[in-house]
Image: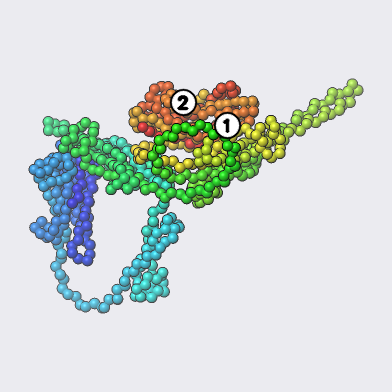
């Protein structure tokens, strides 16, 4: 037996049918049931719903007291009410009574106030026997052919190909031979295996509804789905896009009763979201979503804003995706030469052995690929292109093969050759002689010096500091002959190094406690523009605005961009993230400082990340939040103010925030 609940005068009504078997080889379906909303008026004082089936109509009116109206639809066997069987529709308010509990969303016998029947039509009388017809053609059997489907365009991870058709000899096949030939295939379907991959999180979001079509007195729309990139969405971005929404549920507020001595206000609809451990309902855990009216059912307290256990009328689950299989371990790097042993220190006291932690998932190695960059958009005089990313098999890449495939590239930066020096100015013409003859031409200015090539040297880092799992150190500089270097020899000497970048391999981490990914939303914006100059005014396009949901929570803020400081001598500049126009004060400011030495002009792609719970204006409360970025000078310490330049090349920058406890 299925129930459809009408609360007050809700603008929606759902009718559910059960499939009924009548003891024959055919499956019979009940009559088609249509519903029609009835507004408050002459037919129903407080509005209601009209059921229409096979020309028969049944009117169900709301009682106007704020109590939910319940409808029970069940099969009616052939008999007194329906000679050929049909459907029995019982209606009544959820008020409780003998053996029944008010507000439990179950229509008990004592709560039924009216009963209607929607009957199947009676069988017609047999007609007279007609003359015998010509013998019909021999029936054609339907055949099914199932074959394994390899991984490809039809099934990304393989599966089963199911072909259907009739054994009618189509396309040159042999009719009636019991074999489904290719020419006899009428339809093809694929049943695909699930794909192994990274964990797909279940997401949900609540949207407040004003009074309108979905809910007459307002309520909440609950949208849920997997963060799997369906329909053009971005998989794993922590944001539930429209195309990733799998289910939508409406939880409507009850309507206020009519003004009068007997009328009472309707109760608010409440939704409670709690963690669901791994088990019967969610194999990998997830969220349990309870909903109901704040009507004080059972031992609950009415209208206290808390959904008590006895007030719960519906429970659903939004489950996390299962963990994907561990990736293949990367190849071991070549061991570096052993350093000279130091003197043995005094042995310390043995510490107590800690409990072994659970092995974390193996991380993927960071890879760096260097290639020549021809003169053009990114480097006017050519230079080096530096591609970096994880060897994780993104796109068409092959995981852990030691090769940085195109789809595995996460970041690209450029180190450009210096531009050719300008030609010296021409000498001035000599003055005319006293006899009026022209003076001799001045000597041509000396040619400007050729630009200096940029060099990048990658060095493999063994596990340790600063990279626990090893990685790559990039030494960057100009082949200028600084210090003890040799200019133009194509070798980057130590004194020619102007900046160093470290790219660390991901390291296996211990498994953390189960988080609550489904109850947080990540807000993100991206940008590709370049902004030149330093100013106390925030950068125009590095802006992210969103609504912070709760009081007492903090923001986890991440900012990725390309930072450049130029100028003579030693200089620096600061890039600071502002929250609603003010710097973070707790626990500290979100500041990124870039130092530039010896007049170099280097580009430094980097990520700034931190947590903020308060600014100089006070703690972060719920409501609208705007993040901005400003590039300012003078710089820090003894360095002079440099020339700021934010962003460079085609790489996209990111500014994002997540609300955390």
Q: Position of residue 285 (x, y in %)?
A: 32, 44
Where is residue 240, by image quadrant? top left
Q: Are marks 2 and 1 in contact (CB under 8 Å)?
A: no
SS at badge 1:
strand
Relative vertical location of residue 626 with respect to residue 387 in this rendering, above or below: above
* Other residues around mark 2 within 10 Å, as few (<14) / some (14–19) / many (≥20): some
Q: Which mark identifies residue 321? A: none
Residue at which label 2 appears:
589
Q: Nearer the viewer, residue 423 or 472?
A: 472
Q: Which residue is mark 1?
A: 564
Q: For the residue carrying disc 1, how many other residues have a C-alpha within 10 Å: few (<14), some (14-19), or many (20+)?
A: many
User: From where the camera sits, is residue 41 visible?
Assistant: no
Q: Secondary structure at mark 2?
A: loop
Given residues 456 and 82, the one toward you in this image is 456
At horizontal 42% and vertical 25% (from top left) the residue drawn is 586
Camera-nearest residue between 419 and 608: 608
Query: What's the CA distance linking mark 2 and mark 1?
Result: 21 Å
Q: Position of residue 227 (x, y in %)?
A: 39, 44
């Amino acid at each position: 037996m299925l129930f459809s609940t009408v609360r007050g005068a809700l603008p929606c009504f759902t009718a559910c049918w059960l499939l009924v078997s009548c003891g024959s080889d055919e499956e019979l379906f009940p009559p088609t049931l249509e519903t029609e909303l009835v507004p408050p008026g002459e037919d129903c004082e407080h509005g209601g719903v009209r059921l229409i089936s096979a020309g028969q109509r049944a009117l169900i009116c709301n009682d106007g007291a704020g109590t939910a109206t319940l409808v029970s639809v069940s099969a009616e066997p052939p008999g007194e009410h329906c000679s050929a069987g049909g459907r029995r529709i019982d209606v009544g308010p959820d008020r409780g009574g003998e053996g029944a509990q008010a507000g439990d969303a179950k229509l008990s016998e004592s709560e039924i106030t009216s009963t209607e029947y929607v009957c199947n039509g009676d069988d017609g009388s047999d007609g007279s026997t007609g003359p015998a017809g010509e013998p019909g053609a021999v029936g054609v059997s339907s055949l099914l052919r199932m074959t394994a489907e390899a991984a490809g365009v039809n099934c990304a991870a393989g599966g089963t190909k199911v072909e259907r058709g009739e054994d009618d000899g189509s396309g040159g096949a042999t009719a009636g031979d019991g074999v489904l030939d290719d020419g006899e295939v009428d339809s093809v379907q694929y049943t695909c295996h699930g794909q192994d991959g990274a964990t797909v999180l279940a997401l949900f979001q609540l949207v407040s509804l004003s009074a309108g079509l979905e809910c007459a007195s307002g309520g909440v729309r609950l949208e849920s789905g997997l963060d799997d990139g369906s329909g053009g969405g971005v998989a794993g971005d922590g944001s539930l896009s429209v195309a990733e929404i799998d289910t939508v549920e409406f939880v409507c507020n009850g309507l206020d009763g009519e003004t009068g001595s007997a009328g009472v206000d309707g109760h608010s609809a409440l939704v409670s979201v709690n963690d669901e451990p791994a088990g019967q309902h969610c194999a990998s855990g997830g969220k349990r979503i309870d909903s109901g009216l704040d009507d004080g059912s059972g031992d609950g307290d009415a209208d206290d804003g808390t959904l008590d256990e006895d007030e719960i009328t519906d429970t659903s689950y939004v489950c996390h995706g299962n963990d994907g299989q561990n990736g293949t371990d990367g190849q071991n790097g070549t061991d570096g030469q052993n350093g000279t042993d130091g003197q043995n220190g005094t042995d310390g006291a043995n510490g107590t052995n800690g409990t072994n932690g659970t092995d974390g998932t193996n991380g993927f190695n960071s890879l760096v690929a260097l290639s020549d960059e021809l003169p053009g958009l990114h480097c006017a005089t050519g230079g080096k292109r530096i591609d970096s990313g994880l060897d994780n098999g993104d796109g068409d890449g092959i995981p852990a093969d030691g090769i940085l495939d195109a789809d595995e590239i996460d970041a690209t930066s450029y180190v450009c050759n210096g531009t050719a020096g300008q030609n010296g100015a021409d000498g001035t013409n000599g003055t005319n002689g006293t006899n009026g003859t022209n003076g001799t031409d001045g000597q041509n200015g000396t040619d400007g010096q050729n630009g200096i090539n940029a060099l990048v040297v990658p060095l493999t880092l063994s596990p340790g500091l600063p990279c626990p799992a090893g990685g790559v150190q990039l030494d960057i500089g100009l082949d200028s002959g600084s210090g003890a270097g040799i200019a133009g020899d194509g070798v980057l000497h130590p004194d020619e190094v102007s900046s160093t970048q470290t790219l660390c391999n991901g390291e296996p981490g211990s498994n953390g406690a189960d988080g609550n990914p489904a109850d947080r939303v990540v807000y993100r914006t991206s940008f590709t523009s370049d902004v030149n100059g330093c100013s106390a005014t925030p950068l125009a396009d590095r802006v992210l605005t969103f609504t912070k949901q709760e009081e007492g929570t903090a923001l986890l803020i991440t900012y990725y961009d390309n930072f450049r400081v130029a100028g003579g001598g030693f200089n620096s500049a600061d890039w600071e993230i502002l929250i609603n126009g003010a710097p973070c004060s707790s626990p500290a400011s979100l500041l990124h400082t870039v130092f530039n030495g010896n007049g170099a002009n280097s580009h430094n792609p980097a990520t700034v990340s931190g947590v903020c719970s308060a600014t100089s204006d006070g703690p972060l409360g719920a409501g609208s939040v705007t993040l901005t970025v400003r590039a300012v000078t003078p710089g820090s310490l003894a360095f002079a103010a440099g020339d700021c330049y934010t962003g460079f090349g085609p790489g996209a920058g990111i500014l994002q925030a997540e609300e955390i406890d």
